[in-house]
Image (tube, helix red, strand yellow):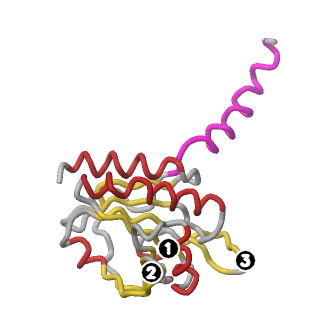
Amino acid sequence: MMRHLPLLPMLVAPALMVAAPAAAQLAPGAAAPDFTTQGALGGEEFTLHLAARLRQGPVVLYFFPAAFTPGCNAEAAAFAAAVDDFKAAGASVIGMSADGVEQLKPFSVQHCSSKFPVASATPAIMRGYAVASDRQYQGRSITSRTSYVIGRDGKIKYALTDSNPARHVAGTLAAVRALGN
């Protein structure tokens, strides 16, 4: 047994890298880049302006890789199930992906249950939030799975980059509640 111990760090280190959440790209305290883009809510297209949303209170801005994929479907359903908790804490939820608005319209109904908007993350938005992934899905760019809580002051209050969609709702909801808005 003792002669195998030198191998333990080589076996454990890769497992820790997979299990631990990756650091988010924008740190708390950083200014959240403002943007305007097209989004969908309940299957209807609209123009989304982040600054206008922030005037109403904190925003949970969560980036997901691609609509209609298992992890993204589950994450959207989890945010939809918790949207009343976010509202009670004074925050709104916005999902973002590199998908076009035509793809997001049915996604906003089927997986977001028409409870919160999803919007198209343009290349400029992806760069601004440092969420552009080096991976692609069906030949197109995707975002990393990253969630931010942005305070009414336009500053990042919480950030999480983690491939596990289950951690995003709990983490962002706790951060919103900690703001005490």
Instruction: Look at the numbered disc 1 and give the secondary structure of its residue.
Output: helix
Residue 82: x and y in percent read 40, 53
- Answer with the quarter of the image where residue 25 lies: bottom left
Q: CA distance from mark 3 to mark 2?
A: 22 Å
How far, Cα to Cα, is label 2 from label 1? 6 Å
Q: Earlier in the sequence, mark 1 or mark 3?
A: 1
Res 138 label: 3
Highlighted range, magenta: 2-22
SS category of the residue bearing label 3:
loop
Q: Is residue 141 above or below residue 168?
A: below
Tag 1 residue: 108
Residue beneath disc 2? 40
The quadrant of the picture occupied by the C terminus is bottom left
The residue positioned 45% from the left and 74% from the top of the image is: 118
Q: Are marks 2 and 1 in contact (CB under 8 Å)?
A: yes
Which residue: 48% across, 66% down?
Answer: 112
